[in-house]
Image (tube, coloured by chain):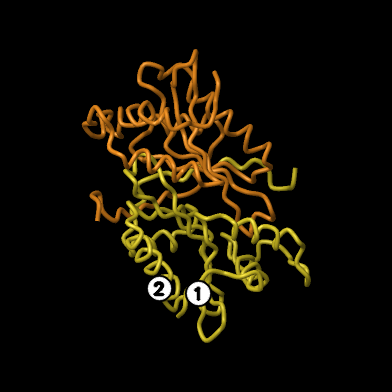
Chain colours: A yellow, B orange
Amino acid sequence: MLIRKATLSDVPVIVRMTNDGGPDGKPRETLPEILPPHYENTFKQIDADPTTSLMVAEIDGKIVGTFHLSFLWYLAGKGRPDAQVEAVHVAREYRSQGIGSEMMRWVISEAKKKDCRRVQLTTNRDRKDAHRFYERLGFTPSHHGMKLVLSTTRG
Amino acid sequence: MLIRKATLSDVPVIVRMTNDGGPDGKPRETLPEILPPHYENTFKQIDADPTTSLMVAEIDGKIVGTFHLSFLWYLAGKGRPDAQVEAVHVAREYRSQGIGSEMMRWVISEAKKKDCRRVQLTTNRDRKDAHRFYERLGFTPSHHGMKLVLSTTRG
């Protein structure tokens, strides 16, 4: 398995993979054949951010997983960053094969290389399987992940 | 109350404020009179990050609170970022006076101006007062905040 930064040409595959399986297991939305331009614009925004990377996991040239990895510095960290993972997804036909674990072990290894204090993420309370998955990797649910949804449609 | 980006000269005040009151209410560590250089280096690292700001709240020229505000873009956000708050602290002698609420209402207002999807943060499970504070502001503990501590000393 190869883990690398995503490129603009990966965006359609990532968008369709991420859309396939919301918290209820159903597609989040019906995607048009040709994706609207906001996806490309968002990719460029992410790609220009020096502290965040959109990553993909590839097997035999096929993208099987994706996640975001950010490094965040705080004064309390004494010069060491925290690593933050978000938007973790594995392609439906590749689930339950250890790909998620391999991606997260890669994240932990990168975080150690960068002398991070910790790796952090939030997982939806309804996703009990995801919760157990992260606990097996050594994560502790020490915090509440609190969200304030501002609006679900464009303002 | 004025909320503004922190400058290098604010760092000693922020560090001492943040140190005063870990999850158990005690100082996190004994700070030397002259702060080690990693604080200045970390400030420069944060200040160079276009997506994260270290903020201070000021009353009559005195710094009374601090927090980090980041904007994170995801493909699933359809061009809209999420706002993330971390490292929220109010100076001990200014607590329970509504300063935290005012800071968070400012964050929510900024997040709306930037057309954010949501504001997110994690709060330690042991801090039940903080949990209630964020619920009063409209936050929902919809997620588990999972942390994997890599090491507490420099590697």
Chain to which mark 1 belongs = A
* Dot 2 amino acid type: Glu
Q: Position of residue A87 (x, y in %)?
A: 54, 60
**Front in this rendered view, residue A147 or A12:** A12
Report crowding for label 2: few under 14, some 14 to 19, many 20 or more residues within 10 A (C-alpha): some
Q: Are marks 2 and 1 in contact (CB under 8 Å)?
A: yes
* Dot 1 amino acid type: Ala
Q: Circle 2 sits in a helix, a strand or a loop, which is it?
A: helix
The picture quadrant where one finds residue B137 is top right
Q: Position of residue B143 (x, y in %)?
A: 48, 49
Q: Position of residue A44 (x, y in %)?
A: 65, 60
Residue located at (66% from left, 57% from top): A42
First in sequence, mark 2 or 1: give its number.
1
Chain to which mark 2 belongs = A
**Front in this rendered view, residue A136 or B52:** B52
The residue under label 1 is A57
Is residue B111 shown above or below A139? above
Q: Position of residue B49 (x, y in %)?
A: 51, 47
Label 2 to label 1: alpha-carbon separation:
9 Å
Residue located at (24% from left, 31% from top): B31
Is residue A28 shown above or below A144? below
The picture quadrant where one finds residue B2 is top right
B53 relative position to A16: left or right: left
**Front in this rendered view, residue B68 or B127:** B68
The residue under label 2 is A102
